[in-house]
Amino acid sequence: MPPDRNLPARYLIRMEDLRRWHRLVVRCRCGHVAVIPAAKLKFGRDPNERLVDLERRLRCRNCGARGEHSVEIENALR
């Protein structure tokens, strides 16, 4: 499924830009894939926090790597 084209450039996306129908698909270099619903990702976070800053803190549950992944935003309604 292609990323949602209605969002701003990847490095400009803030938590408040994500909608309930968005989800993040995170692929680690070890092959682990995680799908994170936007509602879960946004819970308890500053609405002005940029997604790119959060991405740096994500850690793979499989291998423990941090920053060794690719992140895509998908529209779960498609």
Image (spheres, rainbow, N blue to C red):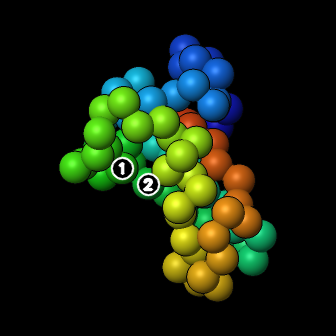
Q: Secondary structure at mark 2?
A: strand
Where's residue 60, x and y in %?
58, 74
Read off the residue under disc 1: 41
Image-based side of 46 in relation to 32, left or right: left
Classify residue 2 by image quadrant. top right
Q: Residues within 10 Å of mark 1 (few under 14, many from 20)?
A: some
Where's residue 22, x and y in %?
43, 35
Classify residue 10 by image quadrant. top right
Please name the amino acid that badge 1 sits on. Answer: Leu
Marks 1 and 2: in contact by CB < 8 Å? yes
Please name the amino acid that badge 2 sits on. Answer: Ile
Above or below for 26 versus 2: below
Query: Is residue 4 among the parts visible in the rendering?
Result: no
Residue at image point 56% right, 52% down: 55
Residue at image point 73% right, 73% down: 31
Above or below for 63 versus 21: below
Q: Residues within 10 Å of mark 2 (few under 14, many from 20)?
A: some
Q: Earlier in the sequence, mark 2 or mark 1?
A: 2
Q: Marks 2 and 1, how far apart in space?
A: 7 Å
Read off the residue under disc 2: 36
Q: Secondary structure at mark 1?
A: helix
Classify residue 77 by image quadrant. top left
User: For the residues carrying marks 2 and 1, which lies nearer the camera in this image?
Assistant: 1
